[in-house]
Amino acid sequence: MLKDITIDQYFPGKSIVHRLDARFKIIITMIFIVMIFAADTIWSLMTGIAFMLLSYALTALKPSLMVKSLKPVVPVLVITAVLNMFFFEGEEIFRFAFISITDEGVKNAVFMLLRVVSLIVGSSVLTYTTSPVELTGAMEKLLSPLKIFKFPVHELAMMMTISLRFIPTLIEETEKIISAQKARGADFENGSLKERAAAIVPVLVPLFISAFRRAEELALAMECRCYRGGEGRTRMKQLKTGPADIASLVVSFFFLAAVFFIDRKMK
Amino acid sequence: MSILKTENLTYIYGSGTPFERKAVDDVSLEIEKGGITGVIGHTGSGKSTLIQHFNGLLKPSSGKIFLDGKDIWENGKIMPGLRFRVGLVFQYPEYQIFEDTVYKDIAYGPKNMKLNDAEIKNRVLEAADLFGIGREMLNRSPFELSGGQKRRVAIAGVMAMKPEVIIFDEPAAGLDPRGRRSVFEIIKSYCRSSGCTVIVVSHSMEDMAGLADRIIVMNRGRLFCHDRTPEVFSKADQISAMGLDVPQITKVFELLRKENIIFKDEVYTVDHAVKMILEYLAEKGGDSGC
């Protein structure tokens, strides 16, 4: 059950998308997000979706993974669609008591649904093809201009790396503790809401204790290896920009321009 | 009659995903009432997965488990009260401690059994005595204790439920030699005095040698053998081929055998070795010249 949660979603591979500079991948993802939000008509949105499908195809990942990234957000999708359906003026096509559904409402619901779905699938292209370490490294580089304003960029990136690293460890730990307390007769499935809430205490306390213990051990291990923050720190794997990175950026801008152009034309 | 029995037990991890793996593969065995059964196997041999089936923490992918002749997953539902009848002490049990006093933590299991307060108190004190946890310690926070003391508190927490079958997963992991010996001594004397069935999981043949009456050897998810301890140790060469370490004293005797010094028994504890050597020398009539 807990194992089904994927947060660290990286799927290693050797495709062109995998090999792109992570900084460019982040920028391209942002361009894509702008595309999706700027799109006002179905045609421009389709252009954005085409861009997303193109990048997805280039990752050489299984199409079924697309569905996997959507699974956890199904409730959000449903709520978005339903709310949009009810709150738009237009020609009424269905009426039940005080509920009325208009053609505009349905159009909007479908539009919002497509928008959110493509947003999630598009950003999963980034997380599927970029390892967490690369991702945070690239963020650190992209945010480094903020250092002028004394913004702790390196510390932030390090914290992100560490938390991503420990999520699977803590999930495993939680499962172990749950099993151990079940073996002592803990019941997580039955009982009133209050009883079930109380049943979580025997899991949370050991989990927190072990998280603090790990944090202390990690801090000690980092100090033993002379870690003292980002100042003057170099990276083992340098990010390199190649022709493929520039080309992909150009293509993304082309699609962005297309979205704006189509919107202008259609209005 | 056997107290625990498995029939063609199979457990598949991550069924239907690319990570699918058979952790336990078609295991059929019977564990007799009373006595200590050792379960040994290399890391990833399926021994921990196997024992988690005995108290219903894992549901078999196929096959059946019987406690006292009753299917524990009859009609797909877990047998009521099963976890109080089959106690399981996990590896590093001290990490499951959560209450603010030692007393409360040991009482957690009995409390879940819905026993009355007097009975809970009796059981806590009994379990504490068994593990040499002094009365003055009962009101202290378990988090102030040393690692070895915490381990004993955690084990006492399972013992206080007085299960008919009690399973220990690597009870001595991470303890120093003295701590190891004392944990094994307690397990042994508890088993003898209470008559309850004890199952101990370990990857060390050395520890099992002086402890277990019978041994189950697991290899790559399959049952390699299940027999009385001496018979299992007679397969020492096959067991070391699996990557398990046989006791050092057994290795010495293997080498002696290669030198044509034959002893009639399999040797796996130092005490037994001393006896065998003395017998051997007596037989030779002391003509060894020393």
Image (cartoon, coloured by chain):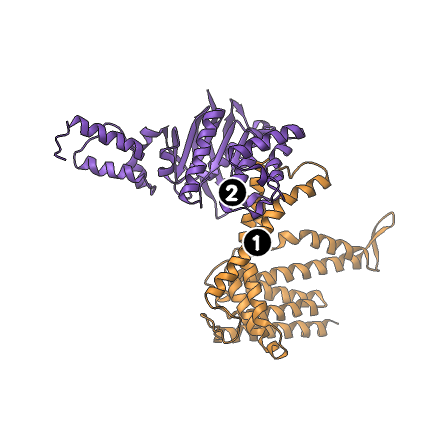
Residue B71 versus residue B2: which sits nearer the camera? B2
Q: Colour of chain A?
A: orange
Residue in the picture at 61% in, 38% down: B103
Residue B154, located in which quarter of the rendered image? top right
Residue B38 versus residue A133: which sits nearer the camera? B38
Q: In the image, residue A2 lies at what x, y percent?
A: 58, 47
Q: Are marks 1 and 2 on the same chain?
A: no
Instruction: Classify B35 as above or below B252.
Output: above
The chain displayed purple equals B
- In the image, which disc is placed on residue B223? none
Q: Amino acid at mark 1?
A: Ala
Q: In the image, residue B230 lies at what x, y percent?
A: 32, 29
Q: Which residue carries the number 1 mark?
A: A211
- In the image, which disc is placed on residue B149? 2
* Label 1 SS: helix
Q: In the image, residue B87 lies at what x, y percent?
A: 53, 32
Which chain is indicated by disc 2? B
Instruction: Classify B247 as above or below A128.
Output: above
Q: Residues within 10 Å of mark 1 (few under 14, many from 20)?
A: some
Residue A198, located in which quarter of the rendered image? top right
